[in-house]
Image (tube, rainbow, N blue to C red):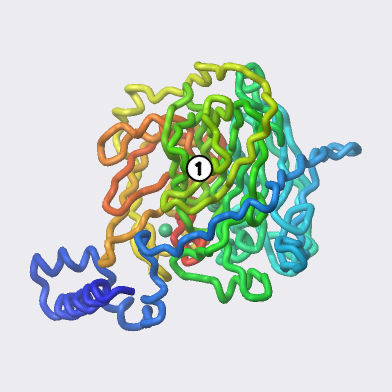
Amino acid sequence: MNSNKLALMMLGGFLILSGCVKEEPAEVRTDQTMMNHDEMEDGMSHGEMEGHMSHDEVMQLKDSTGENELIVPPVLERNIDGDVTYTVRAQKGETQIFNGSKTKTYGYNGTFLGPMLQFTKGETIKIRTINELDQETTFHWHGLEVAADADGGPHDALQPGEERVIEFKVTQEAATLWFHPHPHGNTADQVYNGLAGLIFIEDENSKHLNVPDDYGKNDFPLIIQDKLFDENHQLNYREARNEDGTIGDTLLINGTVNPKLTVEKEKVRLRIVNGSNARNYTLKLNSGDSFVQIGTDGGFLNEPVTVQEVTLTPSERAEIVIDFQAIDATSDLALVNEDGSVLLPFDISHSNGVASELSTQLNDFTLTAEEKNLPVNKTVELFGMMDHVTINGKKFDPDRIDFTQEQGVTEVWEIYNKPDIMGGMIHPFHIHGAQFKIISRDGAAPPENEQGWKDSIAVHPDETVKIAIQFKNKGLYMFHCHILEHEDNGMMGQVLVE
Ligand code: C2O
Ligand code: CU
Ligand code: CU
């Protein structure tokens, strides 16, 4: 921590203490933006304070050397007998991430990360979920519009050795979703160790669109995750853990360290999933070339949006298309982070791939005037850092229902990120069981590449966002910050849909 911040902290502590003695308007106002006296006294140790990272001092990622070809997650085969569509096992094992050494990891149907599950809108899917870990876990389908009993929130724990079959109908449009565990207080650890898989939904629209869809050839998922490896190439979550969100200096894409991607001279679609515990990324090409974004968390944008960069906070997705024929490609073209660190170098082969135009009309997403004018039904206040994170002043309680909402009725949620004495940080806010629409950010229309279905939204310090959300199904759903340590530390609430 720099001395400015330390001074601020001490000043904050002083103001809080004096606020306890005498209440004057100025001090009351100070109080609202700071932790209260009790938290300061018995909760936060000096060491914890030092662990806090504001986004201006985040550890930089090492450049990818590009020595390993990007791993493409396998497509999970459907079961051939019985009526169960897929079997998904959470298991542990060892993975050779670095040459010549084995890292202890978790995975679905393998030792690290998971396969890709393919659903078609309209079909009924049955999944046999099996917990082969030696601790409890759940199977959560992030972004999927399912009844709460299939959603895999913290109430649906499977003990070691247990299995459960869930069933649901796929009712939403084509999108890139993902799945991960959600056990009470232990999500960060399990995701960090490798539990994350992909879901691709396709529908009539997506089948007829002109967008690259040759999986592993011109259509690649990129699950981006930063990790901190110890000297033995182990993940050692306990050591790496930061209460404000664990970050690392090594980027894995689909579990590949030092990845590169070989492509032909054609349009290539990248379905980017921020599967990191806490890190935000702003991705761009090192050449400065623009590309197009075609999809958000929950589906296609109405038309391709030309962008220079795309920012993803934890759990957000963006589908982009890079035209490797149009780019005057030098040998060192790469996807880089905001600070210039090289994340994914491209190896562009000399052969020309498919030359085709992108569809210009991709979807018919609308935010109606009626939706824009709906009154606010629920307010959500995100606050705090480290272990002191709350929603509307409260920590998660599995026995408390925070909100109720009627099935099939659109409501407006207003979400505010209240700054703290350190200035605050972005909280990526996520709601289970539904895709929502962003009405506004601080009163203004969202940028073009957020005018599509979302299930997670980055809320900046002191920002107010308004969303319109409707649940198609019933049950008890979670909403929470998707910095996984914040979620585990109680930055989560529950909405009962009836
Ligand atoms: Cu990605 Cu509560 O989930
Ligand atoms: Cu979720
Ligand atoms: Cu948070």
Numbered label tally: 1
Does residue 191 lie above or below 210 as drawn? below
The image position of residue 298, as x and y in percent, is 53, 34
**Which residue sits at x=78%, y=52%?**
109
**Which residue sits at x=35%, y=64%?**
384
The image position of residue 328, as x and y in percent, is 52, 30
Residue 285 appears in view: yes
Q: Front-most of 103 and 416?
A: 103
Q: Residues within 10 Å of mark 1 (few under 14, many from 20)?
A: many
Q: Front-most of 384 and 71?
A: 71
The image position of residue 44, as x and y in percent, is 37, 79
**Which residue sits at x=58%, y=75%?**
238
Label 1, on which residue?
Answer: 497
Does residue 405 lie above or below 92 as drawn? above
Q: In this image, 278 relative to 251: left or right?
A: left
The image position of residue 34, as x and y in percent, is 25, 68
Where does the N terminus fall, quadrant-wise? Answer: bottom left
Does residue 488 lie above or below 20 as drawn? above
Q: In this image, 305 relative to 144: left or right?
A: left
Residue 200 appears in view: no
**Which residue sits at x=33%, y=23%?**
370
Residue lying furthest right: 81
Q: Quadrant of residue 267?
A: top right
Label 1 beta carbon less than 8 Å to ligand 2? no
Q: Front-most of 126 and 191?
A: 191
Q: Look at the numbered disc 1 and give the secondary structure of its residue.
A: strand
Q: In the rendered structure, which amino acid carries the disc numbered 1?
A: Val
